[in-house]
Amino acid sequence: MLQEKQNPGGNKADIERLQWPDSIIQINAGEPPELEIWWAQAECWSLVEQILLPLAAAIAKDEITRAEMA
C-alpha cells in the first residue's frame, strides 16, 4: 500500500508478489488475502497515510535509520 501511495499505478505485479505477514495469513484462514479486498479497507489506507508515509519520508531524508526502528 505504501508503494502504491508513493507510485500510483506502478507495477502491480511486483506488489502482488510481496510476502504477506504470517499474522495476516492466520487471520485470513491460512490464505493470503486478495489485494483488492485488502485495499478496500479504509483503515489500511489511514495507516499508510498517518504512519508509513511519514516514516518512509523520514528514512529517505536520513532523519531516522532503519536500525533505529528495529
Image (spheres, rainbow, N blue to C red):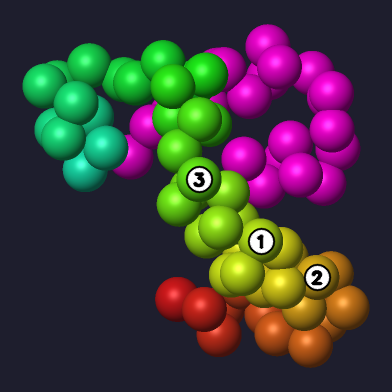
Which mark, residue 49? 1
Identity, as a three-letter code, of the amino acid under mark 2: Ala
The answer to whether residue 20 is magenta is yes
Identity, as a three-letter code, of the amino acid under mark 1: Glu
- Which residues are the magenta region? 1-22
Question: Does the rendering let one see residue 22?
Answer: no
Kindly state the secondary structure of the residue where label 3 is placed. Answer: helix
Q: Earlier in the sequence, mark 2 or mark 3?
A: 3
Query: For the point 55% across and 85% down, which residue is it?
Result: 68
Q: Earlier in the sequence, mark 2 or mark 1?
A: 1
Q: Which residue bears the numbered disc 2?
A: 57
Q: Whole-Å distance between the Cαs marked 1 and 3?
A: 11 Å
For marks 1 and 3, give the one nearer the viewer: 3
Frontmost residue, 31 versus 34: 34
Q: Earlier in the sequence, mark 1 or mark 3?
A: 3
Which mark, residue 42? 3
The answer to whether residue 9 is magenta is yes
Q: Position of residue 6 (x, y in %)?
A: 82, 46
Q: Position of residue 64 (x, y in %)?
A: 70, 85
